[in-house]
Image (cartoon, rainbow, N blue to C red):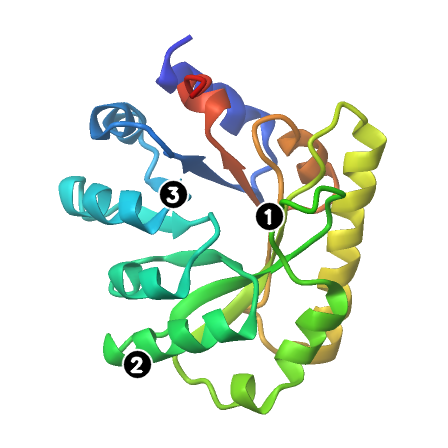
Amino acid sequence: MSVQQNLRDIKESLPASVKLVAITKTKSPEQIMEAYKAGHKVFGESKAQELLPKYEQLPGDIEWHMVGHLQSNKVKTIAPFVSLIHSVDKLKLLKVINKEGHKNKRVIPCLLQIHIAEESTKFGMDFQECCELLESESYRGMKNVSIMGLMGMATFTDNDEKVRSEFRRLKTYFDTIKQKYFPDDDRFSEISMGMSDDYMLAADEGSTMVRIGSAIFGKRPEN
């Protein structure tokens, strides 16, 4: 199957309300251009050091998302142009993003990453830590970040009910945080959940944004 056909099939299977972020981890600019020529312009990277050269080489109207774990010392490389950072998992990181946003005279859109999976290897705050961040004096003083919603990754398992329950929990967290902290802020509207293996379950459970790589570009080679 071609990249164009894969993209078409996935977009046709998704509700119109769900945005597709094509994940380009390890993919060459030529492969990304296949998707771009098919009309897709929203791409996501897992590593800042991969994102910057692709941003510099590829068309300027691409919307670039940072979806992977982000180290504080890498924020400055993507702060001038990144459209959305999905993976804010601590207050310290948000402070750095705010500082770099100020330097670049822009407000950087962010999602707070919540840990919903069983695997301890996945990053993210728990619900209480997320609330503490939003209630902190530090956050309330930030002028160069905008919290647009939440992101989470489900457990890697064939048990669909388990995955559904984790996505459902993230949606419940989103609804609670929206009501408590962002009741009049229309920007807080995104739930980034769902990847190649579980995006349809995520869409069913309220995702507004899915992050799909291998189902578009093919499986990554084993290391």
The type of residue carrying mark 2 is His
Residue 26, by quadrant, is: top left
Circle 2: is it few (<14), some (14-19), or many (20+) Cα within 10 Å?
some
Residue 58, by quadrant, is: top left
Seen in the picture, residue 30 relative to 115 is either above or below; the reply is: above
Q: Residue drawn at (24%, 74%), measured in percent from left and top? A: 104
Q: Residue drawn at (40%, 21%), measured in percent from left and top? A: 217
Question: How far apart are the two marked residues, 3 and 1, measured between alpha carbons?
Answer: 18 Å
Mark before the other along the chain sequence, 3 or 1:
3
Mark before the other along the chain sequence, 2 or 3:
3
User: Which disc, if any, is residue 47?
Assistant: none
Mark before the other along the chain sequence, 2 or 1:
2
SS for dot 2: helix
Say which of 95 and 24 sits in front: 95
- Relative horizontal placement of residue 98, taking residue 60 as reference (left or right): right
Q: Nearer the viewer, mark 3 or mark 1?
A: 3
Quadrant of the rendering where the C terminus is positioned: top left
Question: How far apart are the two marked residues, 2 and 1, measured between alpha carbons?
Answer: 28 Å
**x%, y% of residue 34?**
27, 23
Seen in the picture, residue 13 relative to 24 is either above or below; the reply is: above
Which residue is labeled 3 in the image? 45
Residue 161, by quadrant, is: top right
Which residue is labeled 1 in the image? 208
User: Which disc, if any, is residue 102?
Assistant: 2
Seen in the picture, residue 148 relative to 213 is either above or below; the reply is: below
